[in-house]
Amino acid sequence: MSQTEFLLSKLNEFWQFTGFANVEITNVIMLCVGLFFIYLAIKHDFEPMLLVPIGFGILIGNIPFQPGNEIGIYEEGSVLNILYQGVRQGWYPPLIFLGIGAMTDFSSLLANPKLMLVGAAAQFGIFGAYIIALALGFMPDQAGAIAIIGGADGPTAIFLSGKLAPNLMGAIAVCAYSYMALVPVIQPPVMRLLTTKKERLIRMKPARKVSQTEKILFPIFGLLLTCFVVPSGLPLLGMLFFGNLLRESGVTTRLAKTASNAMTDIVTIILGMTVGASTQASEFLTKETIFIFFLGFCAFVIATCSGVLFVKIFNLLLPKHKKLNPLIGNAGVSAVPMAARISNDQGLKYDPTNYLLMHAMGPNVAGVIGSAVAAGVLLGFLG
């Protein structure tokens, strides 16, 4: 073989190794999806901390390559596959919950405990989506994993889908985070549709001051009460309440800062990137993915409706001076603090002096607990 022929054969081998030679239309579609996520994050400020890592992860996961070189996220031994084990085995979500607990102030909930009921009511989105998923032909464990999207909690969705339906995890995770970013688009029309102008103008009494003792006792008793009822929720609830105790104890400030800042940021980067990379076109572009995105939308709408309607019904039992503004009902989903900000923004549209943010934070943080409890219930029944 001449040197020219040798060189041409090597060039041909190199060409066959490149992404240009292996690209398919499905790769192009997913690359466009990744670019769209990055565009939404940067241009429109839609949850950039989530969508930038996920969007770039989608680009990483959909670069075409020849299998067998330990490159792809689904190839045993590859670096991406090793990082992805934290998603599949459920290592990352509890660490995220530790950070959430360390950065969350539960005072608004403790000041008005009945707001816990609003957070619980919003979890009907999960069980409503579960029923619809069963009707569409999904198996019970798959339906449970998909339904948790309605909790608006990405780490919980990843944790539960990893246990119940690992094959659907990529679609469920991307769907959950996508709809979390779109909460400002999805919720306001539903809130306006279900409330009257008079209801939107309701002014709630200022919350009482919560003592430091109450703040310290809450994570301890919260852990015991929830996990004795739903032990399967212990990985998430245990870390959530532990993080909150670090925050409120007053003697572990440095640990709380580490958990809520550096550690959470690191885990979020790895989690977002690996979740995005798991959307490899061959695994992601399926009929089931379309159904999952449809069910996720249904879950969010049902959750929002449930929260708002519960407040309206609950108001029938409350005296006039203690009535709740139904606009805080949407905050029962656990998209903290985005859902509470939406409640506040909608309230200010109708009364520029009616600030609902602190009131909405009550059901919002209750939704974090509620979604984890709901995940524990589904895992206990279906796992």
Image (cartoon, rainbow, N blue to C red):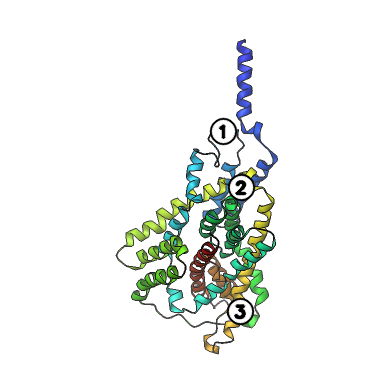
Horizontal side of 244 relative to 42 (left or right) equals: left
Above or below: residue 336 compared with residue 20: below
- Residue at 56% from the left image edge and 87% from the top image edge: 317
Q: Quadrant of the N terminus?
A: top right
At mark 3, the secondary structure is: helix
The crowd level at tag 2 (other Cα within 10 Å; few <14, some 14-19, many 20+) is many
Horizontal side of 274 relative to 217 (left or right) equals: right
CB under 8 Å between callouts 2 and 3?
no
Residue kind at label 1, given as amino acid type: Gly
The crowd level at tag 1 (other Cα within 10 Å; few <14, some 14-19, many 20+) is few
Horizontal side of 164 relative to 229 (left or right) equals: right
CB under 8 Å between callouts 2 and 1?
no
The residue identified by callout 3 is 200
- Residue at 55% from the left image edge and 89% from the top image edge: 320
Give the spatial CA distance, label 2 vs label 3: 38 Å
Q: Which label lies toward us, 2 or 3?
A: 2
